[in-house]
Structures are given as structure tokens and as C-alpha cells.
Image (cartoon, rainbow, N blue to C red):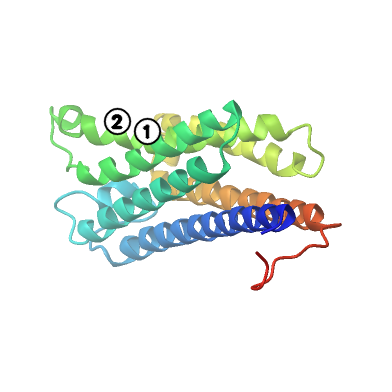
């Protein structure tokens, strides 16, 4: 097989990995969002406006297994994505932090489901839920840190500047989120605010991933220009 053919096939394989990772990531986000919305609608005595997502996953909740299974599957998908990125696409030290954040996000998702939320117990709420809260914080913090790191680095890119600014604003709003309990009116809509910020974060990931994917495909096309020796079944 000629050198050009070998190089062409290597790039095609990378292109397939990029497409696989992109599609799998979008699927994970759509799956998790759908589960959160559906379980919130069918859970008795649950108010999606005022109640947090974790309450749906509490052991006493009737559909907690559905939500928690979704979190575990989501985490496994993120681990699969991380594995393929490390195996095929990681060439420089700049990829180390994103990979660490993906791993934290994945394990946070899995273990917040393994250690679900528990109902409020007077005098013992914090102790009963400390493990769940740690992994829940890991899940959210890794997502937000990934958004802010990418956004700051992308501010100098004119084509990514808009989504970068949106990411910075989004992270700022998420940081403010824990303080809403101080305001009685906002506390009444804490569930709605939590969902809105999570779904907006997912929306940011989808849009940003789509832009990166589109750019990657354009780069692959440009690299193929001028390559006359295309692969064939008879080449050797």
C-alpha cells in the first residue's frame, strides 16, 4: 500500500472516531434530558417547579430507578467517549485537563445514582446525603469548569466568541444558583431554575460540539485536497 493510501486511511479512521464521539455525546445529552423531564412529569407529589432533580432519584421516589439508571448509563457513555478520545485524538498536554474533567463528570454521574438522595430528616439531612451531594457537586462542577475553560480560551476566536460569552454567562448563573435559597421567592422556583440551567448547559455543549465537529470535518476535507492517490480495494 502506498504512503498516501496509508495516510488517507489513518485520517478516515480518525474522522470516524470524531463522528462516533459526536453522535454518542449528543445521544447521551438527549437521553438524560428526556429522562429528567419524563420522570418529573410522572412522579406523584413531585413539583418540577419547586423540587430539585435529586428528589426524583431519592430511594422512596417511585421512579427513582429510572432516573438513577439513566445517570449510570450517561456516565458510562461519557467514559466510552473519554476512552476513544484518549486512544485516538489526544496528542498534546492541552487535552489532559478536558480528559480529567470528562472522567470526573462521568464518575460523578454514576456515583450520584449509586448513592441516591434521601428524604429530609430533621437534624440528620446533611449527614444522610453528604456522599450524594459530593458526587452531585462533582457532576455539575466538572461540567461547568469544562465550559468556562473552553469559553475563556475561545474568546480570541471570532467564530466561537459568541458561544464563549454565552458559556461564561451560563457558568456565572450556575455559581449564583446555590444562593437562591436566601431569597424566598426564588426558593419556590428552585427546581425550575436548576432544570433551566442544566438544560442550558447541555444546550451549550450541543451547540459547541456541533461547531467543533463542523470545523473538524472542514479540516479533514482541506487535508484531502491535492491527494490524488485515493484508496481502492485493489491498492496494495
Bin the neighbour count of mark 2 within 10 Å (Cα to Cα): few under 14, some 14-19, many 20 and up. Answer: some
Q: For this view, does 44 lie left or right of residue 78? A: left
Report how many numbered discs are placed on residues in the image: 2
User: Which dot marks residue 58?
Assistant: none
- Quick one: quadrant of the C terminus? bottom right
Q: Is residue 234 above or below residue 59?
A: below
Bin the neighbour count of mark 1 within 10 Å (Cα to Cα): few under 14, some 14-19, many 20 and up. Answer: many
Q: How far apart are labels 1 and 2 at the CA level? A: 6 Å
Where is residue 108? Give x, y as percent.
34, 38
The residue at 60%/30% (across/down) is 92
Does dot 1 land on a helix, a strand or a loop?
A: helix
Q: Is residue 117 above or below residue 62?
A: above
For the view shown, which residue lies furthest in the bottom direction? 233
- Quick one: quadrant of the N terminus? bottom right
The residue at 70%/37% (across/down) is 165
Q: For this view, does 178 lie left or right of residue 168? A: left
Residue 60 seen in this snapshot? yes
Does dot 2 land on a helix, a strand or a loop?
A: helix
Q: Which residue is mark 1?
A: 138
Q: Quadrant of residue 105?
A: top left
Residue 51 seen in this snapshot? no
The residue at 39%/53% (across/down) is 77
Where is residue 222? Give x, y as percent.
81, 54
Closer to us: 106 or 36: 106
User: Which dot marks residue 134?
Assistant: 2
Where is residue 223? Give x, y as percent.
78, 52
The residue at 44%/29% (across/down) is 179
Q: For this view, does 137 lie left or right of residue 193? A: left
- Dot 1 and dot 2 residues touching (CB under 8 Å): yes
Closer to us: 87 or 111: 87
For the view shown, which residue lies furthest in the right direction? 226
Amino acid at each position: 500500500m502506498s504512503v498516501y493510501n496509508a495516510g488517507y486511511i489513518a485520517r478516515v479512521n480518525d474522522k470516524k472516531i470524531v463522528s462516533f464521539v459526536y453522535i454518542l455525546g449528543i445521544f447521551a445529552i438527549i437521553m438524560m434530558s428526556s429522562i429528567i423531564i419524563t420522570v418529573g412529569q410522572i412522579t406523584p407529589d413531585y413539583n418540577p417547579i419547586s423540587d430539585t432533580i435529586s428528589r426524583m432519584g431519592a430511594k422512596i421516589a417511585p421512579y427513582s430507578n429510572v432516573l438513577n439508571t439513566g445517570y449510570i448509563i450517561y456516565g458510562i457513555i461519557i467514559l466510552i467517549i473519554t476512552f476513544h478520545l484518549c486512544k485516538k485524538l489526544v496528542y498534546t498536554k492541552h487535552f489532559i485537563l478536558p480528559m480529567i474533567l470528562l472522567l470526573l463528570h462521568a464518575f460523578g454521574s454514576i456515583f450520584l445514582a449509586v448513592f441516591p438522595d434521601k428524604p429530609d430528616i430533621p437534624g440528620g439531612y446533611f449527614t444522610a446525603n453528604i456522599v450524594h451531594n459530593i458526587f452531585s457537586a462533582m457532576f455539575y462542577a466538572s461540567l461547568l469548569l469544562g465550559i468556562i475553560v473552553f469559553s475563556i480560551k475561545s474568546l480570541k476566536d471570532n467564530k466561537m466568541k459568541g458561544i464563549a460569552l454565552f458559556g461564561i454567562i451560563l457558568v456565572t448563573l450556575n455559581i449564583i444558583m446555590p444562593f437562591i435559597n436566601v431569597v424566598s421567592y426564588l426558593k419556590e422556583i428552585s427546581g425550575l431554575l436548576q432544570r433551566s440551567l442544566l438544560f442550558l448547559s447541555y444546550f451549550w455543549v450541543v451547540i459547541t460540539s456541533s461547531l467543533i465537529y463542523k470545523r473538524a470535518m472542514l479540516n479533514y476535507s482541506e487535508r484531502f485536497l491535492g491527494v490524488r492517490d485515493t484508496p481502492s480495494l485493489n491498492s496494495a
